[in-house]
Amino acid sequence: MSSKNMKMIIAIVRNADIDVILKALLEKEFRVTRIASSGGFFRRGNATLMMGVEAEKVEEAIQIIREHCEQSLDLAVKHATVFVLDIDHFEQV
């Protein structure tokens, strides 16, 4: 797999949403690493998901995250913060 076609998705999601998001991503065969985290994004418990994906799969992964966040009437409530990074080098050993 060429590194130029790879992206790293780092998604910080609320604990309330993590199980359903993780299940949906795994059902679509995304490889996901879950890390328990806390900090300033949501000021309460959250989880960080890390995924190495092919560039053409980035939008699909983000859409899955978006669709599986619990709905809220409060538009100020954010459910996920997603970063997409270019990968210069990718290797499995």
Image: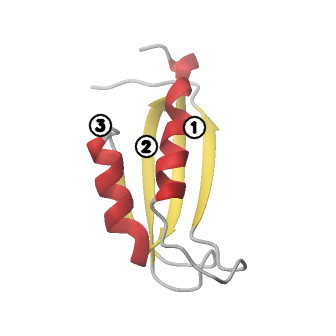
Q: How is the image coloured?
A: secondary structure
Question: Which residue occupies 32% across, 40% down?
Answer: 31
Mark closer to the chain start, 1 or 3: 3
> Residue under circle 2?
51
Residue 28 relative to residue 78: left or right:
left
Quadrant (top left/top right/bottom left/bottom right) for the N terminus: top left
Mark closer to the chain start, 2 or 1: 2
Give the percent coordinates (x, y) of residue 91. Answer: 38, 24
Looking at the image, is mark 2 or mark 1 nearer the viewer?
Answer: 1
Q: Is residue 1 above or below residue 27?
A: above
Q: Secondary structure at mark 2?
A: strand
> Residue under circle 1?
59
Question: Which residue occupies 35% across, 39% down?
Answer: 30
Q: Is residue 12 above or below residue 71?
A: above
The image quadrant of residue 34 is: bottom left
Q: Secondary structure at mark 1?
A: helix
